[in-house]
Image: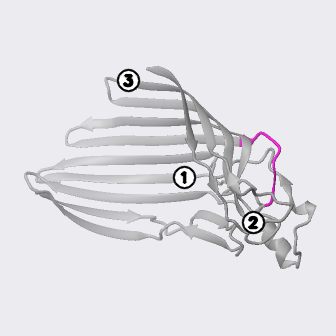
Amino acid sequence: MVYFAVTTGLKPGGVNTLNERGAESLIDDVFAEEEVTSFELGLKSRFGDGRYQLNAAAFLYDYDGFQFHGDNFRRFTNGVGNVDNVRIYGLETEFQGLLIDTAPHTLRLDANLSFLDGEVDTDHRAIGPLTARLARSQGQATLGDDSVVNLNGNKPPKLPKFSANITLTHAWQMPAGLLTSSLTYTHVGSYDYTIFNDPGLGVPASDIWDLSFSYQPDDADWNLDLLLTNLADDDEINARWTNVFGVGQTSEQYVAPRQVIFRVGYQF
């Protein structure tokens, strides 16, 4: 099946903090709603006598009034701003395949791949929180014109160019029950966490491996699960952000460390 869809939606606007901003300000007291129009061309298919399924979708999101957090000339006068024109586009694919189906074993592959990109497609003057923090640390009561940047051409936030989630699942019908094991690989490419694309503040690429086992006895109401997440115990970063609330702290949120989880389930 091939399809084409056009959809629209909006995120409501609101009111920023009411601190005195002065005559010159890059943040308004009120920010507008964010509107998006989505264009999507997709494919859904099943083949190989139903053993394989492939779905794909190419899309374009056209934003009007894209909302972002911005800083300002004076401390504690930050807030949400609007960029008139932002475009995000990409391709997403999903694959499901039964690679082996010979009793007592089955082997299944699930793969989700995505490719994303985008840009700010209009002129817009703004000050990023990192720039504001550095300027104030140097004793500037107000930020100079060299601190103001044009967002035109910048990447929208949180857009990894390539992401993948691949799971290989093996099921073994044992004489006394079903043993299922899964190995999952997750890759998230590097990306900018804010619209300002500050050097050194991007989120680096991450690679995570997870392993799980599940045992379900025949004719029983209970089951046993063993989950091992982040097998390599890597210190991967989920988010890296400099706040716009006058404090100027840069925080990092990490992926959970290696975890070993044992679970007993009962159905009644």
Q: What range is drawn magenta here?
A: 119-127
Q: Do tag 2 and tag 1 residues touch (Cβ < 8 Å)?
A: no
| Labels 2, 1: front one | 2
Residue sitting at x 24%, y 43%: 105
Left or right: residue 123 compared with residue 116 = right
Between the C-alphas of marks 3 and 1, the distance is: 27 Å
Residue tagged 3: 47
The label number, if any, that marks residue 129 in the structure image: 2
Q: Earlier in the sequence, mark 3 or mark 1?
A: 3
Extreme residue in the left direction: 219
Is disc 3 surrounded by few (<14), some (14 to 19) or many (20+) residues within 10 Å? few
Tag 2 and tag 3, C-beta contact below 8 Å:
no
Which amino acid, mark 3?
Answer: Phe
Say which residue appears at 68% left-offset and 52% top-offset. 31
Relative vertical location of residue 120 with respect to residue 234 in this rendering, above or below: above
Image disc number at residue 46: none
Say above or below: 203 vs 7: below
| Residue 93, above or below 202 | above
- Of callouts 2 and 3, the N-terminal one: 3
Q: How busy is the neighbourhood of tag 2: few (under 14 within 10 Å), some, or many (20 plus)?
A: many
- The residue shown at (71%, 58%) is 29
Q: Amino acid at mark 2?
A: Pro
* Quarter holding residue 149: bottom right
Asked whether 222 or 57 is in front, the reply is 57
CA gap, disc 2 to disc 3?
A: 51 Å
**Quadrant (top left/top right/bottom left/bottom right) for the C terminus:** bottom left
Amino acid beneath label 1:
His
